[in-house]
Image (cartoon, rainbow, N blue to C red):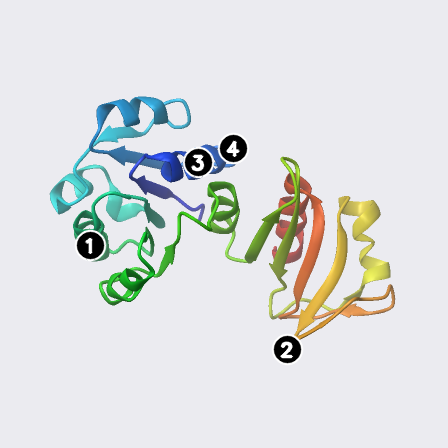
Amino acid sequence: MKKSFAIIGLGRLGLSILKHLSQVTTNIIAIDRHEERVALAAQYTEKCFVCDATKKRALEDLGMNGVSHAIITIGDNFSSSILATICLKELNVKRITVRVDDPENADVLKRLGADETIDPESDLGEMFAKQALSDTVLDYYPIDDDYAIVQILVPNDFKKISLLDLDSRNRYDVNIVGILRRGKFFIPKGSDLIEGNDILMVVGASKKVSKFDQVINH
């Protein structure tokens, strides 16, 4: 089943996440209280709504109870973030991510149902979007507009294969520059095997790495 997203709060961070998610999926709902922000979001998704996210009924009417991952990026009102988190939890949204401007508020939100929090000062919209799209992308470090270093989790049931036989450079146009296995990092040789639960450090163009992730995990 394809992931569906909701972005609540369309300020700088929310629009950045929306922009990068929209490059891969159209299954995104974007909402904000301010009409001018919703108008800006319309260039990235058709499902844009002026809505008060602190009202459970309003969120339900927009189909929020069918969303896989809701991302709350309200930056100017912590109480609104709290109420939106509670509403989404009651609507059985599978994964809830909430922006926090004060790190001390992260624990409060997690107790209320948030699965994770993001810091607008350290989490770029592009980086977070890449991680949100795949459960197996553990971290994403942009090098420039096109290239990135990505941590990819290998599935538990993965059939072992050597780097030489996988031939990621020629087949997928990406390089595996490191492997983290049971907490220990090493730079692999061609004869080394990739095993289930390995974390691969992969370098390449973002689109190429995304396709490689799909090959490894499907």
Mark 2 sits on what residue?
182
Tag 1 and tag 2, C-beta contact below 8 Å = no
Nearer-N-terminus badge (3/2)? 3
Nearer-N-terminus badge (1/2)? 1
Q: Which residue corresponds to the image point at 63% horizontal and 76% vertical from the top-left?
A: 183
> What secondary structure is found at the residue carrying circle 1?
helix
Tag 2 and tag 4, C-beta contact below 8 Å = no
Q: Which residue corresponds to the image point at 42% horizontal and 27% vertical from the top-left?
A: 44
Numbered mark located on residue 82 in the image: 1
Tag 4 and tag 1, C-beta contact below 8 Å = no
Kindly identify the amino acid type of the residue bearing the numbered disc 4: Gln
Which quadrant holds residue 5? top left
Question: Circle 3: is it few (<14), some (14-19), or many (20+) Cα within 10 Å?
Answer: some
Measure the alpha-carbon separation of dots 2 and 4.
34 Å
Which quadrant holds residue 94? bottom left
Measure the alpha-carbon separation of dots 1 and 3.
22 Å
Residue 11 position (above or below residue 42): below
Position of the C terminus by quadrant: bottom right
Measure the alpha-carbon separation of dots 4 and 3.
11 Å
